[in-house]
Amino acid sequence: MCIVLNAKDISVTGRKMTDKIYYWHTGYIGHLKERRLKDKMEKDPTEVIRKAVLRMLPHNRLHDDRDRKLRIFSENEHPFHDRPLEPFVMPPRQIREMRPRARRALIRAQKKEQAIRKEEEGAKNAEITA
């Protein structure tokens, strides 16, 4: 079972809050409805995460079972206090997964840290010999 807490606190990048639109059709002619992500978050923030997760899953026999095992709560309160919950921590991103500009910036920062460490070690060695 996967339990998601604090669904109201999600953050999105860019202008998705105003530009992302969810469409659905009522079944009547000309009744294509739409709602922006901002409005959907105000109405029900759990539905945003549910749609995002379920649309990523393959539509096969297991789809409905996986939907039942996904529990989403907009606040920190949940009815599973008797079970120990394991928080999921995102693993650090690998350099290959990043965009080229971000990758170059990360590599530059790492080289700069190494240079600073070498200077500090050199200063310590100079003090020791003196």
Image (cartoon, rainbow, N blue to C red):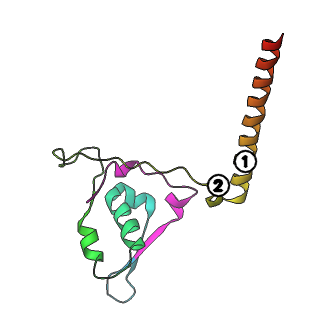
Question: x%, y% of residue 95?
Answer: 64, 54
Question: x%, y% of residue 21?
Answer: 47, 69
Q: Quadrant of residue 33?
A: bottom left
The magenta segment: 1-23
Question: x%, y% of residue 43?
Answer: 33, 58
Q: Residue at x 80, y 24 (%)?
A: 122
The reply to whether the magenta stretch includes residue 11 is yes
Circle 2: element type:
helix
The reply to whether the magenta stretch includes residue 14 is yes
With 97 as the anchor, is 44 left or right in this view? left
Q: Residue at x 36, y 55 (%)?
A: 42
Q: Quadrant of residue 101?
A: bottom right
With 103 as the anchor, is 89 left or right in this view? left
**Quarter containing the N terminus:** bottom left
Question: x%, y% of residue 126?
Answer: 82, 17
* Res 44 seen here: no
* Rendered image: mark on residue 107: 1
> Mark 1 and mark 2: span between their CA atoms?
8 Å
Q: Is residue 41 above or below residue 125?
A: below
The residue carrying mark 2 is 95
Circle 1: element type:
helix
Q: How many neighbours does mark 2 have within 10 angstroms: few (below 14), some (14-19), or many (20 or more)?
A: few
With 69 as the anchor, is 115 left or right in this view? right
Is disc 1 in contact with disc 2, using a CB cutoff of under 8 Å? Answer: yes
**Quarter containing the C terminus:** top right
Q: Quadrant of residue 98?
A: bottom right
Closer to the camera, 107 or 39?
A: 107
Q: Residue furthest bottom?
A: 29
Closer to the camera, 102 or 115?
A: 115
Question: Mark 2: which amino acid?
Answer: Ile
Q: How many neighbours does mark 1 have within 10 angstroms: few (below 14), some (14-19), or many (20 or more)?
A: few
Q: Earlier in the sequence, mark 1 or mark 2?
A: 2
